Image (spheres, grey):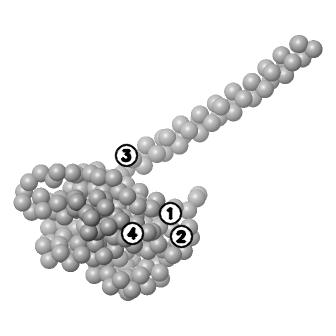
Amino acid sequence: MKTFILSTLSVLLFFSCGSTSSEKKEETKQAAVSTTETVQAVKIGEIAPDFNLIGIDDQQHALNDLAGEKGAIVIFTCNHCPYAIAYEDRIIALDKKFKEEGYPVIAINPNDPAVQPKDSFDKMKERADEKGFTFPYLFDKGQKVFPTYGATKTPHVFLLNKENNQLVVKYIGAIDDNYKDADAVKVKFVEDAINALQNNTEIAEKETKAIGCSIKVAKS
C-alpha cells in the first residue's frame, strides 16, 4: 500500500514539475517579448519615430508636416477615457498657447475600436467637433505607432524639439501633476519643459509617470 501511495505521489510530482517548467518557459517568453518592446520604444534624447496617419479631416499626415518651427507636443489620447476627458481643455490650452511659439499639439488615438467602440474613427470626429479641438487628431490604425513611442496610457505626452532638422524627444510623461483639478495643479510638466527649452536651460523633470487609462489592444 505504501509503495502504491509513493508511486502515485511521484507521478503527481512529475506532472506538477512539468507544469511549473512549462509556466516558467511561458513567463520567460513573455518577458522576452516585453523586453523587445521596451528596446523599441524611443527614449529621451533620441529622434522621434516618424509616422503617416489619417486625421479626422480624412487626410494623411506625417509628423514632419505637422510639427512646428521648434517642435511638437505629441499626445496619445482618446475619446472615452475619464483621464483623457479631464485633460481635454488643458490640451486645447496647450495648443493655443504654444502653437504660435512653434510647439503645436498633435493628438493620436492609439486604441483599437474593436476593443473600445467609443474610440472609433467616427467617434473621434464627433468628439473633436463637440470640444472644438484646435489641433490635428490622428488615428493609429493598426496600432503601429504607439509602441515605437512606448506610450502606455491615455493621455501620454512626448515633447519633441527640433534640433538640426530632426525632431528629438525631450520630455515623456504626464501633462501636469493633478488630473482631477486643473486649478489645483502645482507642477505643469509640459509647460515647464517647453519653457526650459526656450530659455536654453536643463529640463528639471525629463520623465514623469503618465496617469491615465491603459491603451486598448485587441488580443491576438
Q: Nearer the viewer, mark 3 or mark 4?
A: 4
Q: Are marks 1 and 4 in contact (CB under 8 Å)?
A: no
Which residue carries the number 3 mark?
39
Q: Is residue 68 left or right of residue 56?
A: left
Q: Nearer the viewer, mark 1 or mark 4?
A: 4
Q: Secondary structure at mark 1?
A: loop
Query: Percent from the top left, x then y, of residue 191?
Result: 19, 64
Which residue carries the number 2 mark?
116
Query: Percent from the top left, x then y, of residue 121?
Result: 46, 78
Q: CA distance from mark 3 to mark 4?
A: 27 Å
The amino acid pointed to by label 4 is Ala
Q: Quadrant of the C terminus?
A: bottom right
Q: Are marks 4 and 2 in contact (CB under 8 Å)?
A: no
Q: Are marks 3 and 4 in contact (CB under 8 Å)?
A: no
Query: Percent from the top left, x then y, of residue 126?
Result: 43, 85
Q: Secondary structure at mark 2?
A: loop
Q: Nearer the viewer, residue 81 or 198?
A: 81
- Answer yes or no: is residue 187 visible: yes
Q: CA distance from mark 4 to mark 2?
A: 14 Å
